[in-house]
Amino acid sequence: MKILAIECTHQVACVAVRNGNSTVARLNGEWQKTAEVIVPLAMQAMSLAGLAPAALDGVAVSSGPGSFTALRIGMSAAKGIAYGAGCPLVPVPTLLAMAAASCVHTEACHIVPVIPSRPGEYFYSIFRRAGDAPGLLEELGQGRCMAGELAGLLAPFSGDVALPARDAAAVASHAPELAGFVLEAGFFTAESLLPFAASTLRNGSAATAGEASPDYRQIFVPLRKKQ
């Protein structure tokens, strides 16, 4: 299967291209330049994988939650490429993909990936391993809260928990009581989206470019000018 995956929800911009049994991945750490680099990065990866956009079976995109601006950039790039290639688009929930990618890096039964929202505040989802197969997860809940509140939410799991985060040190600084549970999630990249995209495409349940939308999970209210 030939799939392009785009992940730029927070902190890094990365792409991955699967062409049969081989995968080419590219990452750009200058996240502030995501709008400038994401499409050239995707084109470069496809070229290295020996694929033209028209040969793609589908485009996967990390659908959020995450940075409002980065979600729009990633989704717009994915839609444009999918539309131009005439192929389906597969939005992949970011927290689910991060949790699944974490399974081989921790033995914890409960996996709670976190993504920055506002300063000291995080989006989270609580997953429990649902079987022996890696990445098979059951979602128990989701939300957004301050880092310090996570400790209370995780108390019922008696320490059998891992918190994947791209910036583990930041989470620990906001909530020192979580330091022993935070898992540095540098392993989470666009490549983590590929298994979900392949499964969705095989099932025939992918979306069209016009149907997909980012999962913002928060309402933005424009500032009013002072009278």
Image: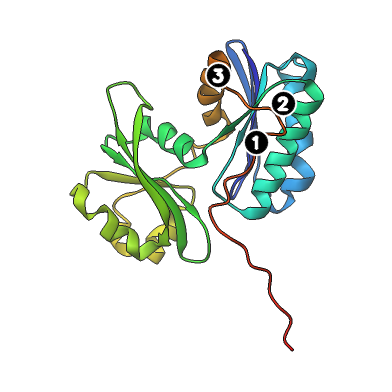
Please state the horizontal and vertical placement of residue 164, each as a whole percent of the image: 40, 45
**In this figure, which residue is indicated by the disc labeled 3?**
198
Q: Which of 195 and 174 is in front in this view?
A: 195
Query: What residue lies at 58% left-to-right and 18% top-to-bottom?
Result: 201
- What's the amino acid at mark 1? Ala
- In the rendered image of this protein, does residue 210 appear above or below residue 35? above
- What's the amino acid at mark 2? Ala
- In the rendered image of this protein, does residue 160 appear above or below residue 52? below
Mark 3 Cα within 10 Å, few/some/many (few <14, many 20+)?
A: many
- Secondary structure category for the residue under label 1: loop
Query: What residue lies at 55% left-to-right and 35% top-to-bottom?
Result: 189
Of the numbered discs 2 and 1, the one sitting upstream in the chain is 2
Mark 2 Cα within 10 Å, few/some/many (few <14, many 20+)?
A: many
* Quarter of the figure with the C terminus: bottom right
Of the numbered discs 1 and 3, the one sitting upstream in the chain is 3
> Is residue 148 shown to the viewer in this render?
yes
Q: Is residue 62 left or right of residue 124?
A: right
**In this figure, which residue is indicated by the disc labeled 2?**
45
Give the CA distance from mark 3 to mark 2. 18 Å
- Secondary structure category for the residue under label 2: helix
Please state the horizontal and vertical placement of residue 139, each as a whole percent of the image: 36, 38
Mark 1 Cα within 10 Å, few/some/many (few <14, many 20+)?
A: some
Place residue 200 in its image quadrant: top right
